[in-house]
Amino acid sequence: MLLRLPEPYDFDVSTERFRVFGADVANLWHEGGLHRVVDGREVRIEAAPGGVDVAPLDDRTRPVVEKLLGLEFDLPRFYAWAADRPVLAELVPRLAGFRPPLAPDPFESLVTSITAQQVSLFAAFAIRTRMIERFGERGELAYSFPTRERIAAAREAELVALGFSRRKAEYVVGLAREEIDLEALAMLDDDEVRARLTAIRGLGPWTADWFLARHLARPRAWPAGDLGVRKAAQLLYGLDVHELGRRLDPFQNLSAHYLLTGMRVT
């Protein structure tokens, strides 16, 4: 069934993140389509005129697919704003139709960030894949991301055996066991979300900022501690990353995604 998306929409560029750093078995690219397990069923998403074809598409899979494909982002307003901005005025048309994907689940988003702390994204994807295969449920091709309950019941040594450092294993299991309603964070403002998350062991400002950016799709989320964002600030603008963040207000989040993706694909 067709899920209509605002045009322009570039499916290949928008899903590039799920391929460029290695296989992502929770969001698996296979023969031109993206596979994800939703409530025990494997969903396939592929490009189609006017949007994407989704099978199956129903009341349970639609919200997950819409979140995954980043429908929360307001691209028309961003494009209009970027049209007279340095760097973005040239970059954005080259990436027209790029809609950054989002992590549908808050626990998945945080665990993904923990695996990526202070390592290359290639290493992070490999370790994350082993964890998903060990603790997730397999569909036809893809795996469901492990539930919070499954990880809470795991032993830290099991994650260490998969390639996690001892400390990161403690962070992931500790997060799963925390008494915090991760879904409820969506009701809080950005500063409160940061405060709640950074109070948890292993979750610093970098992780909190990417949670705001890649799960909650907050427009002003700006991961200033990210090495790639810092490199973009210096190479493309010659500015301190915090100063660049101020100049990109109120579209720091989309700007960060376009700058990072642009440095890889244009």
Image (spheres, grey):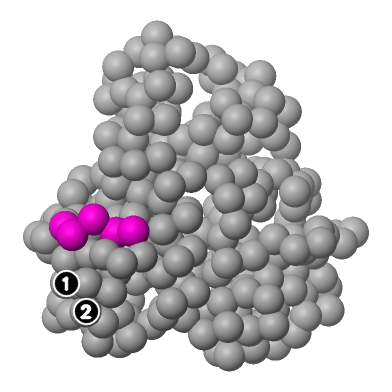
Mark 2 vs 1, N-terminal side? 2
Q: Circle 2 — which element?
A: loop
Q: Is residue 52 above or below residue 243?
A: below
**Number of residues whose C-alpha sits closer than 10 Å to that of mark 1, classed few (under 14), some (14–19) or many (20 or more):** some
Residue 16 placement (x, y as % from top left): 65, 47
Q: Main secondary structure of the magenta part?
A: loop
User: In what quadrant of the picture does the C terminus appear?
Assistant: top right
According to the picture, the residue beneath numbered tag 2 turns out to be 155
Q: Amino acid at mark 2?
A: Arg
Dot 1 falls on a residue whose secondary structure is helix
x and y percentages locating residue 114 in the rendered image? 29, 56
Relative to the observer, which residue lies in front, 68 or 51? Answer: 68
The answer to whether any part of residue 52 appears in the image is no
Magenta residues?
163-167
Question: CB under 8 Å between callouts 2 and 1?
Answer: no
Q: Nearer the viewer, mark 2 or mark 1?
A: 2
Disc 1 marks a residue whose amino acid type is Gly
Residue marked by disc 1: 174
Residue visible at 30% across and 33% down in the picture: 224
Q: Position of residue 4 (x, y in %)?
A: 78, 66
Would you say residue 29 sits in the magenta stretch? no
For the residue carrying disc 2, how many other residues have a C-alpha within 10 Å: few (<14), some (14-19), or many (20+)?
Answer: few
Find residue 220 and report its image quarter. Answer: top left
